[in-house]
Image (cartoon, rainbow, N blue to C red):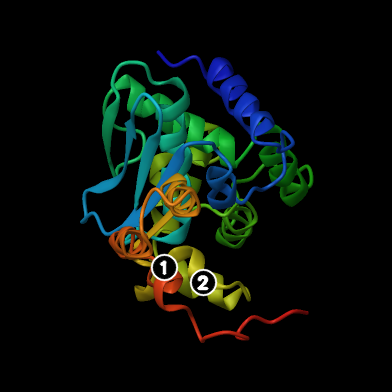
Amino acid sequence: MIDKIDINNKAISIRKKLGEDPSSPIDIFLLAQTIPDMTLVFYPLGENISGACLKGNSSALIVINSDMSLGRQRFSLAHELYHYYFDTDSSSIVCSKEIGAGTINEKKADQFASYFLMPPAALYELIKSFKDGQDRKLTIKEVVKIEQYFGVSRQAMLFRLEDIRELEPNESTEYRQGIIKTAARLGFDVSLYKPSPENKKNLVLGHYVSQAENLLEKEIISQGKYEELMLDAFRYDIVYGEGGEGGELID
């Protein structure tokens, strides 16, 4: 049985460790890039894998399936952070796309991700404000607003609402339809429900890139080797530039 209080405490502790308060929505991609010795890779992993975490003695690698929606990628990254910080059973973990299934550690990682991205107190207050004292289930419009606020996929949102008994599994079935259409009609940007654009399907961020830069600055590797490493990391922007000099907007 999962100790949800312990998992929530772990989520709060990592938010604090990464400089976030206990309740606000977060930019998890940016936070992950601040973790020392962490390399973050976005890569198409097929239909059945959401991500992976590989831990070494001096560095770690998290891989996220860029073919999944942006909201799911955010949840997957939070899931992998649980493995990075707390999973001592294995140094190499590959995770399936189904939320709430698998081993006990997979279930813990999903619970952690849910709490990390949607802190219980913040979620409670948001739901309370929508219901305004009424005893009813959330409408589809309210579900969309909540998932947009926290930046999570519909699957992750329904997993959490079922977990806190705001929706029964049979009740949430209807909310699995027309996801993009509903969000668009409410005026939201629908990128949360779509995979990474083609120019960002393959991308490496974090330790690998900065380490290569350090090696170049110390003249341990040549410019040619540095560029080779960057191309291996799909960082064509670093090697070839984007739009040339003067392309940045200073505003």
Q: Is residue 80 above or below residue 2?
A: below
Camera-nearest residue between 14 and 246: 246
Circles 2 and 1 in contact, beta carbons < 8 Å: yes
Q: Is residue 53 above or below residue 86?
A: below
Residue that appears at 27% across and 29% down:
92
Residue that appears at 27% across and 59% down:
44
Where does residue 114 sit, x and y in percent of width and height? Answer: 52, 37
Please give the count of numbered marks on the rendered protein. Answer: 2
Mark number displayed over residue 194 = 1
The residue that mark 2 highlights is 190
Q: Is residue 171 visible?
A: no
Q: Residues within 10 Å of mark 2 (few under 14, many from 20)?
A: some
Judged left or right of residue 165, residue 173 is left
Q: Amino acid at mark 2?
A: Val
Where does residue 148 sit, x and y in percent of width and height? Answer: 60, 59
Residue that appears at 67% across and 48% down:
25
Residue that appears at 72% across and 44% down:
24
Which image quadrant: the N terminus? top left
Give the distance between the C-alpha atoms of the residues marked 2 and 1, in whole angstroms.
Answer: 7 Å
Judged left or right of residue 19, residue 109 is left
Mark number displayed over residue 9 = none
Residue at the front extreme of this rendering: 219
